Amino acid sequence: MDKILRIDMGAEGGPKVTVTPLGEYVGLGGRAMTSAIISKEVPPLCHPLSSENKLVIAPGMLSGTVAAMSGRLSVGCKSPLTGGIKESNSGGQAAQVIGRLGYAAIVLEGKPATEDLFKIVINKDGVKISVDNSLKMLPNYDLVAKMKTEFGDKISCISIGPAGEMKMNIASIACTDMELRPTRHAARGGVGAVMGSKGVKTIVLDDTGMTMRAPKDPEKFKDANKRFVDGLKQHPVSGQALPAFGTNVLTNILSEAGGYPTYNFKQGTFAGASKISGETMAELETKRGGMPTHGCHRGCVIRCSGVYNDKDGHYLTKQPEYETVWAHGGNCGIDDIDSIAMLDFLDDNFGVDTIEMGATIAVAMDAGIAKFGDAQAAINLVKEVGKGSHLGRILGGGAAVTGKVFGVERVPVVKGQAMPAYDPRAVKGVGVTYATSPMGADHTAGYAVATNILKVGGFVDPLVAEGQIELSRNLQIATAAIDSTGMCIFIAFAILDQPETFQALLDLLNAFYGLNLTGDGVVALGQKVLSMERDFNARAGFTSQQDRLPRYFSTESLAPHNVKFDVKDEDLDKVFNW
Amino acid sequence: MIRGEEFAPLPFFSPMHIKINLFATLRKDRFDTDQREYPTGTTVLAVLNDLVIPEGEAAIIFVNGKHAGPDHVMLDGDTLSIFPPIGGG
């Protein structure tokens, strides 16, 4: 990972490949790399779909090594959804493969003058770019099947579906998993639309002939990795709960806690929660010959995913994540688990963000386009998006656009991005993260749910304003750092609770790079990343007024606890004071 | 002469009705949801003991949707929800 691959899609005579040394970006990875390049090289006032925007795809600092959990990929650009900087994060195989191919980042620049669709193939011999208009409007599963026929099954694919080609705000970038299924997505913020604007349908990766990245101190690295894995296995969340039930184990607890946004954020509990819960899903997956436990990339020891089969025992989709089940489930009043799994498949296949898609359908339901609880109507709406009908194009614009088009007053977005599966009135720490994250409403940016609800990393009462600013600040800093390492965010449960596991992570980085990084160094890295991102957003026109939740969260109470979001504006403005 | 009402149960002996919800691994060999009777003044810890749930396994406890500790005293009609350590996101 000592070079950056730049592809100018708008070069005269066709795409031009340049390989450059790391230069000022040396030592960066993942989110630190994407945000550094975007904040330095992209004019903040550019149109996100213009030739001036760049799409940066970066493996983390430890991706491509044997370190467990190091397979996260960061995708950065100026977001068409938020208008600010974006880092969208994905699992799957891509990060490991790009790391082993030696690239610290792949940067798509410029914009082709024609409507041609390009295919980029990267392997040990270099980079080949060709026009392949036969791929136009192929859904992700069909696209990957075609690539497999053409290049064999040792590849990994990064791709966009029809939504990305249509440059929709909700378009995702798919990454294939170990079974070459396009199930893992850099989904948030419309990164797929930016890839579409570059005319790139897929990047086919093949690391055959390459080796694992070698650490500076192999013995120390091996020892640190062992301690790291032991720590993850020893923690009850990463060692037991996540493998057994997946992320959807949260459905019941959020509904019990009164923080489960239901019917487009109208109430905090959902009567149908148990029917779509992780417990129910795991049982069903086992019964139908699927799998309740499955890793999204090689080297994952938590394995929080699974395989969801249909009623006839055939593969339908990967185990839908909690936020997906919520977005298409309780938030739309839908309690049919098979319909939710079908929606997950359609989202992956068309290439859209499951959170934004579900939140958008709920807003459309509020507008009377469909009835809450009508699963078939929800499926039909997603199909409209895939087809690109006029209605589908509106929905493909996301919750904020849909709310404006249909005159809906209550639209749960921050910086134009839909809130995920935790009501900020009843989980106030994550409300602070929604309001202030440079990414827009994003639970992963500072997952205060851990401390508010799950009692990981201590406990801060979710229903009171006190303590939430500091909690969100610390988590946003830690997350920005972890997102730069290539580590899955689910290592956080263990490193928050077990100092020795945090030390093992530091030792992994130090042994690999020959560093002497301490906890303070990790904090400094996280702060640096957030500062770059906030600086970009400020130059793009963002002020503290964008660091707010929609007004109705402060004026309308949420049942059953009858709580409002009451963290003061002046306190929200202190989140990034360090 | 002893009047009948003097034999009425004293308040602290009157049973409370508690709805108990268990989740994830705690359901194994127990139940998903159950309605049980306990004497007035029963604490969360006493219910955990009754259900043979070690305190460490009851990582997250809600009484009527609000976080509660083992010393919390239950009231008639309360809903007690108990979770093992879980996470996601």
Image (tube, coloured by chain):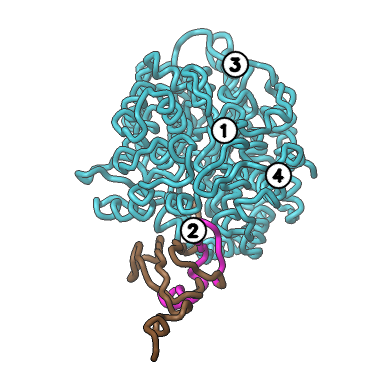
Quick one: SS at disc 4? helix
Question: Label 1: chain?
Answer: A
Q: How many angstroms separate mark 4 from mark 2 (CA)?
A: 38 Å
Residue A110 image label: 3
Chain with brown colouring = B
Question: Label 3: chain?
Answer: A
Query: In this rendering, would A145 be left or right of A183?
Result: left
Q: Residue at position x 67%, y 37% from top?
A: A436
Marks 1, 4 in one chain:
yes
Verify whether residue B47 appears in magenta: yes
Outermost residue on the right side: it is A578
Mark 4 against mark 2, which lies toward the viewer? 2
Position of residue A95 relative to residue B62, above or below, is above
Residue A482 image label: none
Q: Earlier in the sequence, mark 4 or mark 3?
A: 3
Residue occupied by mark 4: A526
Q: How many angstroms separate mark 1 from mark 4 (CA)?
A: 17 Å
Q: Colour of chain A?
A: cyan
Residue B64 image label: 2
Nearer to the camera, A49 or B48: B48
Quick one: SS at disc 2? loop
Q: Residue at position x 67%, y 27% from top?
A: A38
